[in-house]
Structure formats: C-alpha cells, structure tokens
Image (tube, rainbow, N blue to C red):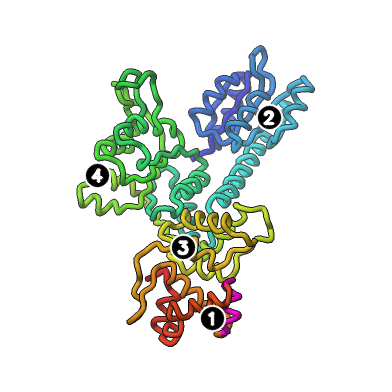
C-alpha cells in the first residue's frame, strides 16, 4: 500500500502538478482550504501532510492547520511548501517541529519528494520507538509473539486478529502495540462492562427516538473506529444477537444503527480478545462458528505471567519505579524469590496490586520476601505437601522462600533469616512450623516446595 499524503494549498494549478509528479509513489489527497483539509484528516489515514502557509482570503491559514495537526494528530509529520512573504508567519512556522521548509522556487518537486520520504522515515522510526515503549518484556515467549505481530503488520495490516490470554496478561496493551505497529488509532469496548440491554446501541449507535431515552443520534463505537482498529475485549461475553451483527460488520463492512433503515459503510480492522475457550463455546452453541472463523485469521496466545519469569522481575521493578521517586527503594533477593515462586493467577494486574500494597504498607525503604508473602495472603485451600504436611498458599510461599534462602546461604540459618529480612526468632519458629527439616531431607518434597507455582 502506498503512503497516504495530504497536500493543502489554495493553488489548484500547484495541486494538479504535485499530484502528477507524486502519484506513482504516493496516494495523494488534496485540499484547497484548512477546513477541507481537516475534513480529510477525519476520513483518510493520512501519514504526512504538505502545507502551504498562506490561504488567501480564508479565515484560517497554514499555521492553524499545522497547530491542528500537532494537537490532534501529532504522529503526522509536516512539510511546509510555501513562498509566503509574511515574515511573521514564516518565523512562526519555523518554530514548529517541521520535517522541512521548501520554498516554491524553480523546480522544487524533487526537493518535495525527498522531504516527504524523509518525513515518512521519521514517522516509521517514531512508530517503532513508540511500540517498544508500549509492551515491555524480557520474556523469549513474548518476544516471539511480538515478532509475529511485526510480521503481520508488515505483510497484512487489515485482517482480523484474535488475542487469547488469561485475565490480566495484557491483552489491551498488546492491542495498543498492534495499533502502533499498524499506525492506526484504537477504539475499545469491554463487553463485560456493557449491559446486555444497551450493547447494540453502544456498539452500532442509534437514531433519535429509536427507544425510550434516545433523545438524539448516537455514533456507535465501531463507527468511531472508522479507518482504525476496533478492539472488542471480553469477546466471549457477546450475546448471540450481537454476534450476528458483528458478523455482518466483518463480512459486509457495514453497520446499521438501532432505529435506522440505512446502513453505513465502515473501514475497520477488528481485534478481539478473550480469556474463554471460544472453540468450546462453539461446541456448546454459545458462540457462532462463522464469527469465530471470521475473527481468527491470526490468533495470538499471550502466555500467563507464571510462564514468563523474566517479566515478573522486570514488571516488579518498573512498578516500584512507578510508585515511588525514592531511588534508594529496592527489592531484596528474598522478595525476588517469592515473586518468581508465586503462580500469579491474576497475572500482571495482580503483580501490580501486590507491589503497590507492599510499598504502601512498608515502613522500610525495601521490599522483603516476608512483606510480599503477607501481601499475597492465603489465596487457596491447603495444599498437601507430604505424608503429614499440608500448607496453605501463604505458608507454602514462606517455606519456599526459606528453602531458597538456606540454599543461598549454605544452610546458615542466621544468614538465611537476615536474607529474608525477618527476626531470627521468627525464622526458627517457621522452621519448625513448616517442617523445613523434613522438606530439606526429602529431595522430591523439596523440589515440589521450591516450585510452588506449579502446585
């Protein structure tokens, strides 16, 4: 697909010449006024704008259009093409972040072509940089998944995508990464938070008088995503009626607002996300098979946090930085042991909550293993560990942390207590309470405890 370029200039002769010289390389939209340029920007996914400064006799000039772009579409690079004689306006333009300023002198068209290419390259680099700032990961599994997204964006930037993953794994964050790679905006809807009785109106819009309370026309979320990405989270919560209408939108590229007899054409890329097994729902007649087949052109499986131990440490560290400006606050090694041992059923969302809880309640400028254990709490029934030993989740984490500390300190109990940041009296009480001697003497039992996340 050729890049979409907007050229805004009140000189029709110049516009015709620019289109003729650039049309083989770029898709050109033209505007002879700032008003018409703004209208184009709402309908066409413009990737770069070429703007004249002087729109003779018009209410708004090129500076107004540049400022509009900076405010509304800061990712669109701007090239100024002008012979404006008004020094004030030229100086004002030069204070903006422009790709280039090209005078309308001689044969300027090749200079314009070079400036456009330069601007598009800047946009590409900024897009890649922004996408890297959206989804942070040290996990090989996640890096492989992001590589797949990059490949899709390069070769197929329009087909539907289905994201599968447990609650809290980052499905919406991954969608923002996809949007940055595809250079598209995102409109999101969470079906779990939209009441079933208003779902059709929220998604597809409605006309005034369509039902009680519909006092004016409403544009639905799908139509708001025109020329961009519509992200439908909790896809498995859609009713069969909504599923049928979504299928029409995907297949026919059109929607019909509630109460309307007219359909509206849409250009939307769908990204759906769910933590449910849609294949099983299809088998149970709870989800339409034709919609499932239409949505899963590309399927992205986000691994749970327990399968991304590298990210547990990365995210915990980033959350600490987010919740404090104190550079001296640090995570102790005992806390890292507990964090990586826990199975994180709530994934990244739960990890963030735990880090915030520890930092809020801690009187020290440190995060200890004990503090993390207390913050996690008892989140499951007792787990049978050995012949005569059952521990709840919190105590299993404590036992795991104790064993890791003993291993690191060559079984020196005093040093292990210091490593965990607990009083030695408490540490020795735990040794007896959790049967640490029994666990340490049994290699199989010891392995089960230290891999507590898999219990």
| Residue on which disc 3 sits | 141
**How far is the residue under mark 2 from the one under mark 1?**
67 Å
Query: Would you identify the image quadrant in which residue 210 lies?
Result: top left
Of circles 2 and 1, the one toward us is 1
Q: Is residue 256 above or below residue 270?
A: above
**How far is the residue under mark 2 from the one under mark 4?**
51 Å
**Residue 223: percent from the left, percent from the top?**
40, 30
Crowding at dot 4, Cα within 10 Å, few <14 / some 14-19 / many 20+, comes out as many
| Residue on which disc 2 sits | 80
| Residue on which disc 1 sits | 406
Crowding at dot 2, Cα within 10 Å, few <14 / some 14-19 / many 20+, comes out as many
Of circles 2 and 4, the one toward us is 4
Instruction: In the displayed orientation, state which residue is furthest to the bottom.
Output: 441
Left of 301 or right of it: where is 361?
right
Residue at the spot 47% in from the left edge and 64% down from the top edge: 308
Mark toward the start of the polypeptide (1 vs 3): 3
| Residue on which disc 4 sits | 288
Crowding at dot 1, Cα within 10 Å, few <14 / some 14-19 / many 20+, comes out as many
Magenta residues span: 412-422
**Residue 13: percent from the left, percent from the top?**
61, 19
Residue 319 seen in the figure: no
**How far is the residue under mark 3 from the one under mark 2?**
44 Å
Q: Is residue 209 above or below residue 393?
A: above
Tag 1 secondary structure: helix
The front one of 418 and 323 is: 418
Of circles 1 and 4, the one toward us is 1
In magenta stretch: residue 44: no
């Amino acid at each position: 697909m050729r890049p979409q370029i907007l050229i805004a200039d009140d000189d029709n002769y110049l516009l015709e010449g620019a289109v003729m010289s650039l049309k083989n390389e770029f898709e050109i939209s033209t505007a002879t006024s700032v008003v018409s340029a703004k209208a184009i920007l709402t309908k066409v996914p413009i990737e770069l704008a070429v703007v004249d400064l002087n729109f003779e006799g018009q209410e708004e000039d090129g500076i107004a259009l540049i400022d509009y772009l900076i405010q509304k579409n800061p990712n669109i690079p701007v090239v100024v093409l002008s012979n404006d004689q008004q020094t004030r306006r030229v100086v004002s333009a030069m204070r903006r972040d422009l790709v280039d300023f090209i005078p309308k002198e001689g044969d300027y068209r090749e200079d314009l072509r070079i400036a456009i290419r330069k601007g598009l390259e800047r946009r590409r680099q900024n897009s890649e940089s922004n996408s890297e700032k959206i989804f942070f990961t040290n996990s090989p599994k996640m890096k492989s998944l992001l590589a797949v997204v990059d490949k899709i964006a390069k070769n197929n930037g329009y087909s539907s995508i289905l994201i599968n993953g447990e609650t809290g794994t980052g499905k919406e964050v991954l969608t923002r990464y996809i949007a940055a790679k595809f250079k598209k905006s995102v409109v999101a809807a969470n079906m779990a938070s939209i009441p079933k009785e208003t779902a059709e109106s929220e998604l597809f819009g409605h006309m005034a008088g369509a039902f009680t309370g519909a006092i004016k026309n409403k544009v639905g979320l799908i139509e708001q995503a025109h020329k961009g990405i519509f992200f439908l989270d909790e896809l498995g919560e859609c009713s069969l009626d909504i599923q049928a209408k979504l299928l029409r939108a995907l297949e026919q590229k059109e929607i019909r607002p509630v109460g309307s007899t007219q359909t509206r054409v849409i250009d939307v890329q769908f990204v759906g996300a769910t933590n449910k097994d849609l294949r099983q729902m299809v088998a149970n007649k709870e989800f339409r098979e034709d919609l499932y087949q239409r949505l899963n052109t590309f399927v992205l499986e986000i691994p749970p946090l327990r399968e991304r131990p590298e990210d547990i440490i990365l995210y915990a560290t980033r959350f600490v930085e987010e919740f404090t400006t104190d550079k001296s606050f640090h995570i102790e090694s005992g806390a890292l042991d507990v964090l990586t041992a826990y199975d994180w059923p709530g994934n990244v969302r739960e990890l963030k909550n735990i880090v915030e809880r520890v930092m809020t309640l801690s009187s020290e400028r440190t995060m200890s293993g004990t503090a993390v254990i207390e913050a996690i709490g008892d989140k499951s029934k007792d787990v049978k560990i050995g012949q005569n030993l059952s521990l709840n989740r919190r105590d299993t984490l404590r036992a795991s942390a104790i064993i890791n500390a003993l291993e690191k300190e060559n079984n020196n109990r005093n040093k292990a207590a210091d490593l965990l940041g607990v009083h030695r009296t408490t540490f020795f009480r735990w040794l007896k309470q959790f049967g640490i001697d029994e666990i340490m003497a049994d290699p199989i039992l010891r392995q089960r405890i230290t891999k507590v996340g898999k219990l």
